Amino acid sequence: MGNNYGNIRTLQNFRDFIESKSVSVVGIGISNIPLLKFLCKCGVQKITARDKKDIFSDGSITELEELKKEIDINYILGENYLDNLKEDVIFKTPGVRRDFPCFVGAEQNGQTVTSEMELFFMLCPAITAAVTGSAGKTTTTTIIGEILKNGGKKVYVGGNIGVPLLNEIENITKDDYVVAELSSFQLFDLNNSSFAPNYTIITNITPNHLDWHKDMTEYAEAKKIIFKNQKESDRVILNYDDELTRSFKDEVSSTAYFFSMNILPEEYKDGIYCKDNSIFVRENGVEKKIIDKNDIFIRGGHNVKNFMAAIGVTYDIVGTDAIKKTANTFGGVEHRIEFVCKTDSVSYYNSSIDSAPTRTIAALNYFDRTEEDKKIIVILGGSDKKIVFDPLAPVVYTKAKAAVLYGATKEKIKKCLDDYGVVQGRKDPAPTIKIADSFDSAVIMAKGLAVADDIVLLSPACASFDCFKNFEERGNRFKELVRRF
């Protein structure tokens, strides 16, 4: 990092550093407007805001125009938005790769290339927990926050979810807790010594975002950054049941805890696992019961795993009462197998977050009672992340009575399901497969296929960007259509 940026540790350090610098923010939109406000608050007089898209077409124009009354903002929009990147300090959105030649060249020229999350961790005085993984990270992050709150701690939850943490930095103290969900994109920007959380979790690693990462190896390496700079006294919690995640233990310098749906081998003295329908913590070989699995209000084996990972962070901070209270009351996170409503005796669930086949498999298996098999109409499709759908087909055949396909991947998914349908020896009756010409028509088509006691599940197995800005917008559109029924 140029200009002594890497030595910054306090907000006053940053203000002193930034006040005389030219600043560029690469990647605007609603999510980065809080960063612009923060920079303005820190004394920045002029900002160059760059984006490939027309940022004034997504409803953010009012807020940006209000901000322009406080600070001089020069906009560079369109295909050439990264040309002439000459500013002293460049704040880059996680969706733009840090190894682009323009950023590499900028750093070689002594400019500072950074990100909102990188600056936050440089300034944050609190006890920090960071969570990543291909699936389950949002729920796990939220559960940790709820357990700590129920244990009387002051907690800030954010990162890839919720409010921008940087805007809370003035209020955060060394006695507080910060729980951050981090995507592989964000971790790509945190590969330096300033990022060293006290607790880290990797929930699992399955193929994802291979349209952005060069390959699966790079994706996994990005996830490892989460524990790379931890000290021996810090803790990393890894999924023992995920072979790739389990293999990371040899690269860990902090204290490693595994979590597993089964009793851990005796060689692992520290961990969290299920036994006799309960969740136990083992520390230095000594076993302690934490809660019963039946204490967990939200259904599904994946949510048992999410709670075990969260317990790995919290059990010795707040104790079992706070954990049990959270398990009893936590109802899940929006867009993650979210019950929307029941109409005409048909139940509708929104799991728009499911942007990869592994997530959709987990969502289908969430409905794990025998009487729910073959009652699910699942809506699949969206933009293509270059992930194969083969593992999804047998679960769709087992769990779903029908699949409604839409979006850029609809033909790719149909071929996968059709190919599985001709496999010799397959015993599951084939689900009805329908093709819709739009998202709205897919939802209406799913309704038409449903009868009393059926379940309509939006679990797309794909990203949303062919039709929507993000999975939240997709999920909200689903809920809007369903509630009209």
Image: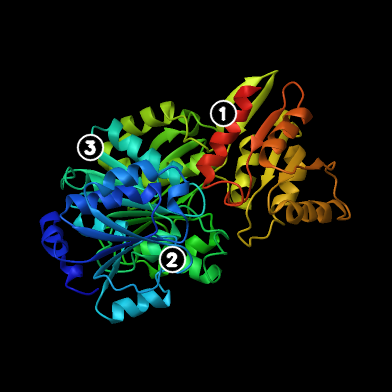
Q: Amino acid at mark 1?
A: Phe
Tell me which numbered mark, 1 or 2, is placed earlier along the sequence.
2
Q: Position of residue 351 (x, y in %)?
A: 57, 39
State which quadrant residue 319 falls in. Answer: top left
Question: Which residue position holds label 3?
Answer: 154
Separation of marks 1 and 3 at Cα, in angstroms = 30 Å
Is residue 231 visible to us here? no
Tell me which numbered mark, 3 or 2, is placed earlier along the sequence.
3
State which quadrant residue 226 falls in. Answer: bottom left
Question: Which residue position holds label 2?
Answer: 222
Tell me which numbered mark, 1 or 3, is placed earlier along the sequence.
3
Q: Quadrant of the C terminus?
A: top right
SS assignment at label 2:
helix
Question: Which residue position holds label 1?
Answer: 339
Q: Left of 275 or right of it: where is 27?
A: left
State which quadrant residue 236 falls in. Answer: bottom left
Is residue 428 visible to us here? yes
Q: Which mark is residue 219?
A: none
Separation of marks 3 and 2 at Cα, in angstroms = 30 Å
Q: Amino acid at mark 2?
A: Ala
The residue closer to the viewer here, 70 or 328, is 70
Q: Are the residues tagged 3 and 2 within 8 Å (C-beta)?
A: no
Q: Amino acid at mark 3?
A: Lys
Image point (24%, 46%), residue name: 69
The residue closer to the viewer here, 476 or 134, is 476
